[in-house]
Amino acid sequence: MYVNAWTWMNQMQNLELDRMLDELGVQKAALSTSVLIGLAVTTGVALLWCFFGLKLIRLWAALLGMCAGFGIGTAAAGALHLDATVALIIGVAAGVLLAVLGAVIYKAGIFLVAWIVGSSAGILFLQPQDEKILLVCVGIGFIIGLLTIWLAEPITMILTGLYGAFCAGAGISLLVPLESPFLRPAVSVGLAVLGIMVQFLMESGKRKRRHLERARRIREENSTENEVEKARAMMEDLDHLPDAKKPKKKLGSGKKQKEMKTGQNKKENRKQNKEKGKSSPTGGNSGEDDDITFLDLDE
């Protein structure tokens, strides 16, 4: 059964799940479980966008880059009337290329996410019926992407917070019956405000830790430089001291031991000579001669 795409989108915006299932011609009992699982997964991903849009920007850039590259590659191959296999190969190659660029290059990933999200938001609100309006939506997304060159983090946090909040609000309103018509947009607005605040707080804490780490490194570098300067100044002061005030070099241990041994030998020889002088018949003269002879030998 043919279903008008624009009518189906309007019904999705109005959160009329039952009517969409009826127009698809599928029994609700057979599809309800799979639809609820899909909605739950989609809502969970939307909440991640809302609260962790900037933190997981490389992941979003890789996923969106893969999808966008595949679509652009296959569309270009179809416009050139290439074979289906060749078009598929070109689409996969373009998708992988954009995914790698978005995941590896931080600025490129932010630009890609902002461009795709801005374009899809323009399509959702303007609902283009012709190619001109569609190009306008793509141009709006491109301008938003260009703004991220100067204000990457703030624009990304606001954009992902809003986009994730409204998608999550739509999913929650489908999963949980909300009777009041004002309660549905209130959920989306509340999630948007909360998600943007959480993202700004996380980014502020990240920058604070980065500044503290940089300050710690600067303190360590300055401390090392101060120690080196103190040691250099001390060496210069020692060089300028007069010779009398400079610390004297101590004698080596070998020379000290030699002098002490020589002194002990002298004392013992003198003692022996005195004893010999006392016992000899000539009295002290012989001791004096021997003492003089010993001194001459030692000298």
Image (cartoon, grey):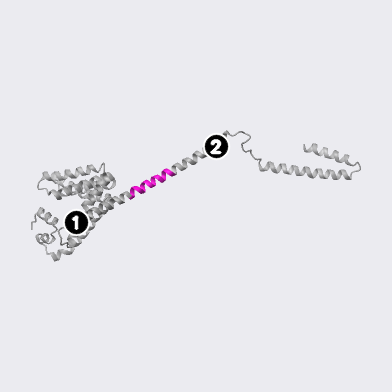
First-in-chain label (2 vs 1): 1
Q: Is residue 291 visible?
A: yes
Helix, strand or loop for disc 2: helix
Q: Residue furthest right?
A: 281
Q: In the image, is residue 176 above or below residue 287? A: below
Inspect the magenta stretch and tell me whether residue 217 lies in it: yes
**Drawn side of residue 125 relative to residue 62, left or right:** left
Give neighbour class at mark 1: few <14, some 14-19, many 20+ (Cα, 10 Å).
few
- The boundaries of the magenta stretch are 205-219
Element type where label 1 sits in the image: helix
Q: Which residue is mark 1?
A: 186
- Rendered residue at 25%/47% (across/down): 156
Return the x and y of residue 19 as percentages of the image width and height: 10, 60
Q: Nearer the viewer, residue 212 or 109?
A: 212
Please report contact status of discs 2 and 1: CB closer than 8 Å, yes or no. Answer: no
* In this rendering, position of residue 236 left or right of residue 216: right
